[in-house]
């Protein structure tokens, strides 16, 4: 099964992607995780990505697309995958479409977790407080939500037009959301 997970920051997308990938026995690929690892290891990619990430901005498409290209070329995605955090812009979605065509990969579904703005803000605030860097983190988190609305949300329509979009209610307990996702993947 080849899937893309979509949803705003605070939608629980990352948590669910890990769980569903484990259940389905497919590869979970989070571009955020790849970038954080690159920053930690001080690689060229990490050095270029760091300042964007600190501000909650998207890193340039050119940096990200290469990560996915490499993963496809290495065969890491051959047994199925969940892409988590990619694509995040229309150009990324278009590049991905080309990569899929070139490699004869079929996308089964793009799963969108639907969560109200109110819940997102509550979760973001909760997280910011937990992490103890109140203002900083909350500002960055709010910026990420704005970036999502402007740059990422348009890809929901992109996948709707491709007839692969599935919307899932994300306003529930993690177990219930997991069940909702497994239901639409049947
Ligand atoms: P995430 O863990 O998915 O929330 O990603 C953390 C940060 O990594 C984001 O705020 C972006 O700065 C960067 N990032 C992750 N994936 C992408 C992507 N597909 N395009 C651009 N930036 C990304």
Image: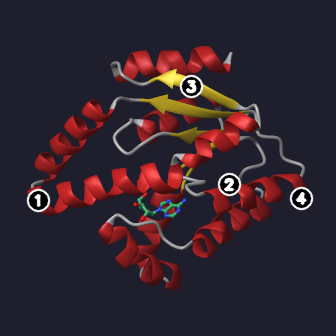
Residue 83 located left or right of residue 121: right
The reply to whether discs 4 and 2 touch (Cβ–Cβ < 8 Å) is no
Quadrant location of the C terminus?
A: top right
Residue 93, above or below 9 = below
Whichever of labels 3 and 4 marks the residue nearer the N terminus, that label is 4
Q: Badge 4, how many Cα within 10 Å: few under 14, some, many 20+?
A: few
Q: Which mark is residue 167?
A: 3
The x, y position of residue 46, in whole percent, is 45, 78
User: Which one is earlier in the sequence, the residue at label 2 or at label 3?
Assistant: 2
Give the distance between the C-alpha atoms of the residues marked 4 and 2, in whole angstroms.
14 Å
Label 4: which residue? 102
For residue 28, which numbered disc appears in the image?
Answer: none
User: What residue is rendered at 20% in x and 36% in y?
Assistant: 122
4 to 173, vertically: above or below: below
SS under mark 2 = helix
Name the residue carrying label 1.
135
- Residue designated by label 2: 93
Return the disc, 1 or 3, that comes first in the chain's sequence.
Answer: 1
């Amino acid at each position: 099964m080849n899937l893309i997970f979509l949803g705003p920051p605070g939608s629980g997308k990352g948590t669910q992607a890990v769980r569903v990938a484990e259940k389905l026995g497919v590869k979970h690929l989070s571009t955020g995780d790849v970038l954080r690892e690159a920053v930690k290891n001080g690689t060229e990619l990490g050095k270029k990505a760091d300042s964007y990430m600190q501000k909650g901005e998207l890193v340039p498409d050119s940096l990200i697309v290469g990560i996915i290209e490499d993963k496809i070329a290495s065969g890491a995605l051959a047994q199925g995958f969940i892409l988590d955090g990619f694509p995040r812009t229309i150009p990324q979605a278009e590049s991905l479409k080309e990569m899929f065509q070139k490699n004869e990969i079929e996308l089964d579904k793009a799963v969108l977790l639907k969560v109200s703005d109110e819940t997102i803000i509550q979760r973001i605030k909760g997280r910011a407080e937990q992490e103890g860097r109140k203002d900083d983190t909350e500002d960055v988190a709010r910026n990420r939500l704005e970036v999502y609305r402007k740059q990422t949300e348009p890809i929901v329509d992109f996948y709707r037009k491709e007839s692969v979009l599935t919307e899932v209610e994300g306003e529930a307990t993690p177990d219930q959301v997991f069940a909702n996702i497994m239901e639409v993947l049947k």
